Image (tube, rainbow, N blue to C red):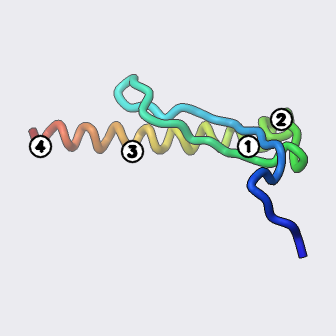
Amino acid sequence: MGQHNLTPGKTSSLAVPIMCRGRFVAALTMIYFSSAMKQPEAVARHLEDLKATAAAISRDLEIAAGDNAALN
């Protein structure tokens, strides 16, 4: 049986901004164990998907912001 503790190991992360109307509103972050994947591999494997997902969220926020502005 595995051991559990509060500090399971060193982590690294990749993050991309989520924008709305030219303003930063959030970050989409992927956190992973450094022992599982080195930073260059994480960038090569996941950065484009993170960027595409953040862009889709940003577009949806822009649409929602426009819809809310029409209600005011």
In depth, the one of 43 and 1 nearer the eye is: 1
Quadrant of the frame with the C terminus: top left
Residue type marked 4: Leu
For mark 4, give the secondary structure.
helix
| Image coordinates for residue 65, horizontal then vertical, percent | 27, 38
Residue type marked 2: Gln
Sequence-wise, which precedes: disc 1 or disc 2? 2
Residue denoted by label 4: 71
Q: Is residue 62 above or below residue 23?
A: below
Residue type marked 3: Asp
Residue type marked 1: His
| Residue visible at 35% across and 27% down in the picture | 21
| Residue visible at 85% across and 43% down in the picture | 34
Query: Between marks 2 and 4, how big is the CA–CA gap?
Result: 45 Å
Residue denoted by label 1: 46
| Image coordinates for residue 61, horizontal then vertical, percent | 36, 41
Residue denoted by label 3: 60
Residue denoted by label 2: 39
